[in-house]
Image (tube, rainbow, N blue to C red):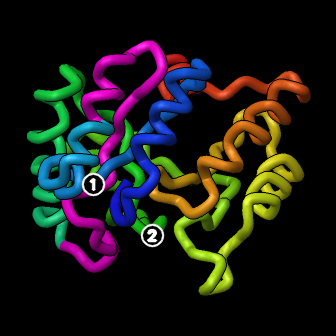
Amino acid sequence: MGGRLDPALDIMDWLIANGVPATIFPTGKIASTTAVGRAVIERAAAHPDLFRVGNHSWDHPNFTTLTAAQMVDQLERTEAVIEPITGRSTRPWFRPPYGAQNATVRAAVGGAGWSYTVMWDIDTIDWKPESDGGPTTDDIVAKVLSRVQGGSIVLMHLGGYHTLEALPRIVEGLRERGLVPVTLDTMFGR
């Protein structure tokens, strides 16, 4: 959650109503300066059995272009707005904006306490509208269900185009395969 916010609350409500766990990675700026961002974090806090909140930076810069001090500032600013709402640290989970990371980034964020730099093996590209060549609902469902395996991390966005429409079919398809969505805490036994 770092850009478009519609339909973030509808997605959160669907996940809650259907008991589907997820790890949410908001930017601190969106989580603290928008009503929708605050509402997403509040919903996550109200359902700690379903949601874990990680750190996605303050304002979504490419971390490979920042100094170590700038990286830590991005993470700490985000932590300062999320932890009071959720009652939990975003540590140890960090998802780098754009997936941009390298050894320098991992060392800086790991040294600051975010020891897991979370990447994914399935990217739905749901942030991109169809009008710009982005996927349809069917494309998203097909991509996830054709590639998913136990331990997969699927990248989806709370502001994604067609994400809300794709979720029911994805979750049903996962369950038919004997796969269960979990938070990163559960996946990694934390």
| Residue that mark 2 sits on | 98
Q: Whole-percent x and y of residue 163? A: 61, 53
- Residue depicted at 90% across the width and 26% down the height: 176
Stretch in magenta: 41-66
- Residue depicted at 32% across the width and 49% down the height: 26
Residue most toward the top?
Answer: 49
Q: Whole-percent x and y of residue 18? A: 61, 22
Q: Whole-percent x and y of residue 125? A: 62, 67
Q: What element carries label 1?
A: loop
Residue 186 falls in image quadrant: top right
Relative to 125, say whether 11 is above or below: above
Given this view, does label 1 or label 2 mark the residue nearer the observer? 1
Q: Whole-percent x and y of residue 188? A: 55, 25
Q: Is residue 26 left or right of residue 125?
A: left
| Residue that mark 1 sits on | 27
Residue 170 in magenta stretch: no
Q: What residue type is labelled 1?
A: Thr
Q: Does the rendering let one see residue 108? A: no
Q: Is residue 106 left or right of residue 130?
A: left
Residue 29 falls in image quadrant: bottom left
For marks 1 and 2, the one nearer the N-term is 1
Q: What element carries label 2?
A: helix
Mark 2, residues whose alpha carbon is within 10 Å: few (<14), some, or many (≥20)? few
